[in-house]
Amino acid sequence: MKLIYKGKTKDVYSLGENEVLLKFKDDVTGTDGVFDPGANTVGLTIEGVGKSGLRMTKHFFELLEANNIATHYVSADLNEVSMTVKEADVLGKGLEVICRYRAVGSFYRRYAAYCEEAQKLDALVEVTIKDDERGDPVISEDTLAMLGILTNDAYQEVKALTQNICGLIKSELAKKGLDLYDIKLEFGRNKTTGEIMLIDEISGGNMRVYKDGKYIVPLELERYFLG
Amino acid sequence: MKLIYKGKTKDVYSLGENEVLLKFKDDVTGTDGVFDPGANTVGLTIEGVGKSGLRMTKHFFELLEANNIATHYVSADLNEVSMTVKEADVLGKGLEVICRYRAVGSFYRRYAAYCEEAQKLDALVEVTIKDDERGDPVISEDTLAMLGILTNDAYQEVKALTQNICGLIKSELAKKGLDLYDIKLEFGRNKTTGEIMLIDEISGGNMRVYKDGKYIVPLELERYFLG
């Protein structure tokens, strides 16, 4: 198995035949040792966080599959803490698609002049480019089109998919009394078909979830949600 | 005449009857004593820059009027270095609408991973909120709508107006061998009719213009353009 990419929270190995293996690690993003799903540096290592993230990811990808949503998911191996997925080309050099139900995190930091912290938002979709050096800047639909990253049609497809996917995730969480504030997804194109599909993972590491007004860290979230 | 607002580059006086007087100052935006139309602090004072800006503004607003574009312009008094305009409510708490023909300034700083410096852009419109404390963040059409700042229809109206206005300005400049790289406009609603119209000024202070590949500072621009 050939290592093809060492990521912040996952390593990626080639399996041949248009499949890759994602090996989940115990590293999470954050700043100064404090977990922050919006950060783009590894902030700390928490034992068991990789396996916990994989369990959540497996659950959600299987839910999406049952709802006929295109994802890269093939199978998960909880013992090996790894997931087999279809190979994908990321959009551009990697985009993050955020769906917001509450004004928190970078959104609130940017637009505090126009909103209260944690005020409700109606599945607002924002796209940022993955660019650590420039702090993952927000990018508009028109700019994505102008720079040849995503056509307007592809943008609308990604936006609709995002609202659909996140609506399902939000409902699932709500069944356990958990309140989704925001979540970040990543999409790619299936390397064989070119189809846009959901890639990466879906876990506490890329969402902010609250219970009774209190933020729930990823490991705790998995216990509430799957435990 | 009652002073109602002290701006960075202009002071505003009430004239009653839904009109206000803008008094142009010799202050320009910049950082550390260097002029930068994209900066949001007063960087330096240049004698004559107020009058020069007013001459440009008068020229362009009269051009727009001749093209039936709604603006706040009523008249200009070059001796008093002032302009009489229709009273307006700014959009939100003040938005800047940027039209880009080249990837320079904050655009290039944000998206350098996807473009070459000064590469051509096709009248790309971006909106930023005026918020010095938060560095004038970019805001998307959907976010403007979600935060109740601008409906999607109003956004499309502002975008079309911007491309129309900036196309006229770009053509005028081109007649003198001057190349418009980017320009920032401001819109408001006519206080009596509610109509969206162009407000503020149009001068070297809010555009980047090049001649033979070299950036032209505002005072020099006025000499090339009107001199």
Image (cartoon, coloured by chain):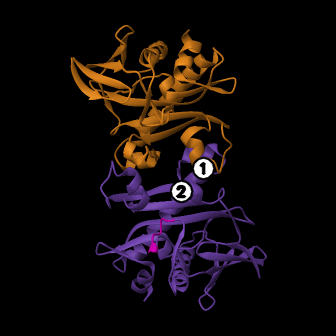
Chain colours: A orange, B purple
Q: What percent of the width, then of the height, locates residue A62?
A: 45, 13
Residue labelled with disc 2: B135
- Label 2 marks a residue whose chain is B
Q: Earlier in the sequence, mark 1 or mark 2?
A: 2
Q: Residue furthest bottom?
A: B79
The answer to whether residue B37 is magenta is yes
Q: Looking at the image, which residue is at 44% across and 48% down?
A: A142
SS class, disc 1: helix
Q: Is residue A131 left or right of residue A162?
A: left
Instruction: Tell me: A112 left or right of B55.
Output: right
Residue B13 location (% of width, % of height)? 72, 78
Q: Can you tell which mark lies on residue B153? A: 1
Q: Nearer the viewer, residue B51 or B121?
A: B51
Classify residue A196 as left or right of residue A203.
left
Q: CA distance from mark 1 to mark 2?
A: 27 Å
Residue at the image point whose x is 56% and y is 18% from the top: A220
Q: Nearer the viewer, residue B76 or A126?
A: A126
* Image depth: mark 1 or mark 2 in front: 2
Q: Nearer the viewer, residue B223 or A112?
A: A112
Instruction: Assess disc 2: are there few (<14), some (14-19) or many (≥20) residues with their C-alpha within 10 Å of its C-alpha.
Output: few
Q: Amino acid at mark 2?
A: Gly
Left or right, A96 with respect to A7, comes to: right
Report the residue that reaches farthest toward the front.
A33
The local secondary structure at tag 2 comes to loop
Query: Picture coordinates of residue B67 (x, y %)?
Result: 53, 73
The amino acid beneath tag 1 is Asp
